[in-house]
């Protein structure tokens, strides 16, 4: 059996043009990070790595769009899991756009971190559930140590 880390995961370019396009990682640790030029850096993630990508874009008219995606890198042999701005395969666990929904996700991430939990290790189903609930204007479910332990046990036994 191949080690998943030996397979190509996901790669993307982070762009930072002050007050125009700003992209950064809220959490996640890239395997590699290479500066392309003074505005772009290419980061790559191993299969299984989870990261949160924040994107802030301002138009010529002054309109601002903010979005947050939580993404899990997958082995490159999964062509059905392709996102247009990612090279390789990736599974989008959550996508929220707009100030209110993005703030709700950021608050949730902060609450998870305050419990001493790493958001990269959170159950992928939780991020999907959070995404669906925010889209339906429903209450945000808490993620605590008990739910996290259940996820770790389930992952270890499957």
Image: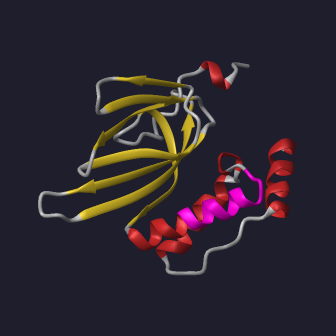
Judging from the image, the colouring scheme is: secondary structure
Question: Can residue 115 be found in the magenta stretch?
Answer: yes
**From the viewer's perspective, is residue 65 above or below residue 142?**
above
- Locate residue 94 relative to residue 126 in the image: left or right: left
Q: Nearer the viewer, residue 132 or 70?
A: 70
Please state the horizontal and vertical placement of residue 2, each as a whole percent of the image.
69, 19
Residue 149 coordinates in the image, percent (x, y): 85, 55
Magenta span: predominant SS is helix
Which quarter of the picture shows residue 49?
top right
Residue 17, located in which quarter of the rendered image? Answer: top left
Residues 10 and 43: in front is 43
Q: Nearer the viewer, residue 126 or 65?
A: 65
Quarter of the image for the N terminus: give it: top right
Position of 138 compared to 114: left or right?
A: left
Taking the spot 49% from the left edge, 68% from the top edge, the residue there is 103
Where does the image place residue 38, in percent across and percent down from the top left?
29, 28
Residue 95 location in percent, x, y? 46, 58
Which residue is farthest bottom? Answer: 138
Q: Which residue occupies 35% across, 40% down?
A: 85
Q: Quadrant of the C terminus?
A: top right
**Does the magenta run of residues contain 133?**
no
Q: Is residue 66 above or below residue 48?
A: below
Q: Residue at x 32, y 31 (%)?
A: 40
Q: Which residues are magenta?
A: 106-117
User: Image height check: is 74 above or below 105?
Assistant: above
How many numbered discs?
A: 0
């Amino acid at each position: 059996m191949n080690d998943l880390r030996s397979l190509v995961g996901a790669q993307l370019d982070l762009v930072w043009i002050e007050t125009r396009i700003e992209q950064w990682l809220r959490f996640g640790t890239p395997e590699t990070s290479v500066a392309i030029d003074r505005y772009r850096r290419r980061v790559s993630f191993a299969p299984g790595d989870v990261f949160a990508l924040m994107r802030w874009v301002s138009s010529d008219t002054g309109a601002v769009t903010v979005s947050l995606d939580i993404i899990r890198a997958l082995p490159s042999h999964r062509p059905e899991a392709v996102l247009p701005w990612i090279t390789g395969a990736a599974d989008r666990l959550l996508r929220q756009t707009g100030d209110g929904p993005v703030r709700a996700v950021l608050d949730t991430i902060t609450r998870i971190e305050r419990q001493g939990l790493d958001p990269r290790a959170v159950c992928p189903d939780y991020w999907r559930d959070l995404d669906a609930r925010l889209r339906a204007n429903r209450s945000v479910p808490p993620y605590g140590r008990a739910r996290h332990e259940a996820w770790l046990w389930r992952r270890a036994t499957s």
